[in-house]
Amino acid sequence: MTTDSDKPDKDVLQDVLLDVEQVDDPELLELMAFIDEMRDSFQPPRKEGTKRKQGKRRETKKRSSSYLTPQNFESLDRVKRECQRLLKVKKSGQVSKSRITDISLEIILKDFQQHREKSILARKLKEYLDGQG
């Protein structure tokens, strides 16, 4: 007979840090979804008398996290440097991985809206799904 003390401790933090597709615990997935919902509404307390920064980015951008394959992660870094050289950019912040990702996503989403099942996104997802089965 096995008792709770005989079972190895589950490393919840490791599960959270893994790709969501690898998490198989429904309660953990529910918790992760709840945390994502709450993150958007949470405002850290401000000290009395301090002003909140009204930066341009806060008004126009939303923060997002994504998991990339190691190859895409390295390629994104390489493409950033190449774009900086090609466009003769003086400030490194003008060409960022975030900006490249946003522009790329915009292109992919427009292609999907126009071509649906023949879009690059639909074809690549189908390849991925066919490879898993």
Image (spheres, grey):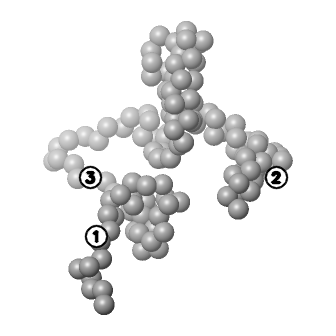
Task: Label 1, secondary structure: give it.
Answer: loop
Location of the C terminus by quadrant is bottom right
**Type of residue at label 2?**
Glu
Question: Residue 44, labelled with which disc?
Answer: 3
Regarding residue 98, the answer to whether it shows in the image is yes
* Image location (x, y in percent) of residue 55: 38, 34
Q: Position of residue 88 (x, y in %)?
A: 55, 9
Residue 117 — which label? 2
For the point 28% across and 70% down, the residue is 9
Q: Given this view, does label 3 or label 2 mark the residue nearer the observer?
A: 2
The type of residue carrying mark 1 is Asp
- Kind of residue indicated by mark 3: Pro
> What separation in Å lies between label 2 and label 1 (alpha carbons)?
44 Å
Q: Quadrant of the N terminus?
A: bottom left
Say whether disc 1 or disc 3 marks the residue closer to the N-terminus.
1
Q: Is residue 102 left or right of residue 6?
A: right
Q: Identify the residue at horizontal 67%, vertical 58% (top origin).
A: 132
- The disc at residue 9 is 1
Q: Is 118 positioned to the left or the right of 55 in the image?
A: right
Task: Give above or below for 22 relative to 81.
Answer: below
Label 1 CA crowd tier, 10 Å (few <14, some 14–19, many 20+) = few
Q: Residue 99 sits in which quadrant?
A: top right
Q: Nearer the N terminus, badge 2 or badge 1?
A: 1
Proximity of marks 1 and 3: CB atoms separated by less than 8 Å: no
What element does badge 2 sit on?
Answer: helix
Which residue sits furthest left?
48
